[in-house]
Image (cartoon, rainbow, N blue to C red):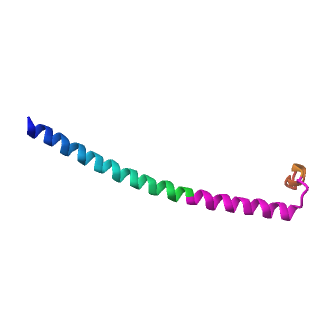
Amino acid sequence: MEDRIEQRLIDLEIKASYAEDMIDRLNEVVVRQQAQLETLARELTGLRQRTQDSTGAAPRSLREELPPHY
């Protein structure tokens, strides 16, 4: 009986160790993705700013963007 309880405790410790490792790896992924999101947000802001600067404050009409064959 005591061997069974000890084995169950060992199994639980192993599972807890794997779970802790998985949480650490997932946390690393989340941190990396957050950094990527922040980089993309900065790039998008820069692209929006450049687009506004190059076209002026007035929005362009879709008619102006039609290909010449229309």
User: Magenta residues: mostly which secondary structure?
Assistant: helix
What is the quadrant of residue 25 in the picture? bottom left
Front-most of residues 67 and 4: 4
What is the quadrant of residue 36 in the picture? bottom right
Q: Residue at x 74, y 62 (%)?
A: 47
Taking the view exactly as shown, the residue that stands out farthest to the front is: 2
Front-most of residues 57 and 55: 57
Residue 47 lies in the magenta-colored region? yes
Vertically, is 27 above or below 4? below
Front-most of residues 34 and 62: 34
Picture quarter with the N terminus: top left
Question: Seen in the image, is 32 located left or right of residue 64?
Answer: left
Q: Residue at x 45, y 57 (%)?
A: 28
Q: Position of residue 22 (x, y in %)?
A: 37, 51
Q: Residue at x 87, y 61 (%)?
A: 55
Q: Position of residue 17 (x, y in %)?
A: 29, 50
Q: Position of residue 16 (x, y in %)?
A: 29, 46
Q: Position of residue 21 (x, y in %)?
A: 34, 53
Taking the view exactly as shown, the residue that stands out farthest to the top is: 1
Question: Seen in the image, is 36 located left or right of residue 14?
Answer: right
Query: How many numbered callouts?
Result: 0
Question: From which residue to which does the magenta span run?
Answer: 35-60
Question: Seen in the image, is 38 located left or right of residue 67?
Answer: left
